[in-house]
Image (cartoon, rainbow, N blue to C red):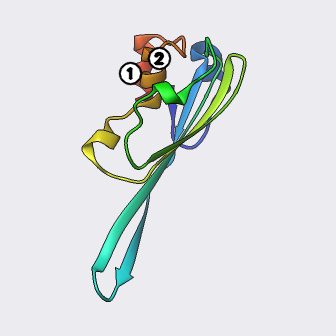
Amino acid sequence: MYSDGFITEDGLKKERLAAVLMKPTGLINFSKNSGSIFTSETNHYYYGRNAVKAIDLSRIDIPKNVAISVHQSNSEYWIHLTICSNSEEVRHFSIIEALSEKGFLDIKISTMKNII
């Protein structure tokens, strides 16, 4: 289930997964020599109860400019994903899909469409 800023308990009970995708923030850095440089940052938070084994990020192909923090206890997990880029590779990266493909999460394909 997708939410813009909050997690609903009904969706969490049904899908065992909730996503909070924060709106992007941007920053312009000014320099005498190189002009202005625009950078953006987007934060995604995922909470779920459908992990089937310990999440191992070393087995996931994480694009450049993406930072991931995982806290896990048994089947429950909290993921904080920070994206500091607007590249094509990063825009199409889904940590939930990557973890599901590697067998870390028990998630249905129909649910994936709601959170990507």
Residue 72 falls in which quadrant of the image?
A: top right
- Please indicate, yes or no, whether residue 23 appears anywhere in the rendered image: no
Instruction: Identify which residue, 8 or 112, lies in the foreground.
Output: 112
Residue at position x 65%, y 16% from top? 13
Q: Is residue 53 above or below residue 64?
A: above
The C terminus, quarter of image: top left
Residue that carries the numbered disc 1 in the rendered image = 113
Secondary structure under the numbered disc 1 in the rendered image:
helix
Residue lying at the far bottom of the rendered structure: 32
Left or right: 84 as drawn, with respect to 49? left
Kindly report the distance in space between the C-alpha atoms of the residues bearing marks 2 and 1. Answer: 13 Å
Give how far across and how far down residue 109 sits, in percent: 40, 12
Mark number displayed over residue 100 = 2
Nearest the viewer among 25 and 5 is 25
Horizontal and vertical percent position of residue 61: 40, 31
Q: Is residue 18 above or below residue 30?
A: above
What kind of residue is marked 2? Ser
Residue found 57% across the figure and 16% down from its top = 15
What residue is at 42 percent from the left and 36 percent from the top?
Answer: 62
Residue count near mark 2 (Cα–Cα under 10 Å), binned few <14, some 14–19, many ≥20:
some
Disc 2 versus disc 1: nearer the observer:
2
Picture coordinates of residue 1 (x, y %)?
A: 51, 25
Residues packed near mark 1 inside 10 Å, few (<14), some (14 to 19) or many (20 plus): few
**Please, what is the three-letter code of the amino acid marked with disc 1?**
Lys
> Does label 2 or label 1 sit earlier along the sequence?
2
Q: Secondary structure at mark 2?
A: helix
